[in-house]
Amino acid sequence: MKTRLIHLLLLFWLPVSASWAQDASQPAPQAQSPTSPTALPDSPTAKSSAHDRPPRIFWVIPTFTITESKQPAKLSPKQKLEIVVKDTIDPYTIGFTAVTAGIAQANNDMKGYGQGASGYAKRFAASYTDQASAGFFGGFLIPSVLHQDPRYYRQGSGPFASRFTHALIRPLVTHTDSGRRDFNWSGLLGSLAASALSNTYYPQEERGVGKTFSRWGMGIPLSVIDHLIDEFGPDLQHMVTPQRKPTECGSPASASEVSIHPPN
């Protein structure tokens, strides 16, 4: 389970901003010309892409674990592992881990690691191992055994309440390899396995059954915030990204970009 530095910030302003994004994405009505005496042939109409998700949300967060296809292709175990590896070695993951390790050192979290360069290295290694193990168990091993799809199925359009609810229940509901909805055993058991594994390298005071389930429980609301970013992040990014200008009249356009309708 990946975590993000902007978790708490987005928790408060993401729903409102996403609602603005939906309003802004609605096409403005075009004014009709009152002086047109006869109907003209339809002009070339640009085709919009069905998958308008940017390759990185906010230009930095990778989207390997997101799909916008309504009927995505089934992933083989090898493909699930490839997604986990890409997400784990991505520069964003490494950079985020470095920042969170620095914050933990400044707050003297996990005191058993100590301070100085050695303490920082231990915190970095522990945080990075947490993310790698959560991806391995929850994104590859258990989904492969249970034939579940570890990806987030982004709706991308529709009523805000429906999309918000879709992201909200994602930690508990996932899809099988065949496309059916199922209880998210992979995500929950994968997170629990990673929390249990951390007992082997966390300081002594952070180990034990109670600490394990505490970490596991805290991961669920953080997963909700992750999926809210997955669902609404591209909309927010589009709000601040200049829109591509429409093709001007008379300018050439390729056949793959436009469709021509013959006059009636």
Image (cartoon, rainbow, N blue to C red):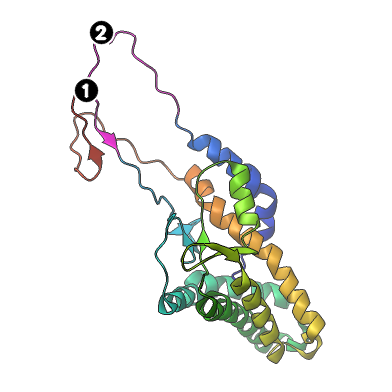
Residue 105 picture location, percent across and down: 71, 78
Question: Quick check: 165 above or below 102?
Answer: above
Badge count: 2
Question: Quick check: 115 above or below 231?
Answer: below
Within 10 Å of disc 1 (Cα), the crowding (few <14, some 14-19, many 20+) is: few
Magenta stretch holds residue 165: no
Depth check, front residue: 230 or 110: 230
Task: Give residue 241's quadrant in the image.
Answer: top left
Q: Which residue is drawn at 24% across and 26% down?
A: 42
Task: Using residue 253 as the reference point, say whether residue 206 is left or right of it.
Answer: right
Q: Is residue 108 visible?
A: no
- Tell me the quadrant of the picture where the C terminus can be found: top left
The span shown in magenta is 28-46
Is there a contact, CB below 8 Å, between mark 2 and mark 1? no
Q: What residue type is labelled 1?
A: Pro
Residue 217 picture location, percent across and down: 74, 71
Residue 260 picture location, percent across and down: 21, 34
Query: Which residue matches tag 1?
Result: 41
Task: Using residue 5 as the reference point, say whether residue 67 is left or right of it.
Answer: left
Q: Which amino acid does label 2 sit on?
A: Pro
Q: Residue at x 34, y 37 (%)?
A: 245
Question: Quick check: 58 above or below 88?
Answer: above
Q: Is mark 2 on a helix, strand or loop?
A: loop
Main SS of the magenta segment? loop
Task: Give residue 134's quadrant in the image.
Answer: bottom right
Within 10 Å of disc 2 (Cα), the crowding (few <14, some 14-19, many 20+) is: few
Q: Can residue 130 be seen in this view?
A: yes
CA–CA distance between discs 2 and 1?
A: 13 Å
Depth check, front residue: 125 or 134: 134
Magenta stretch holds residue 41: yes
Query: Which residue matches tag 2?
Result: 37
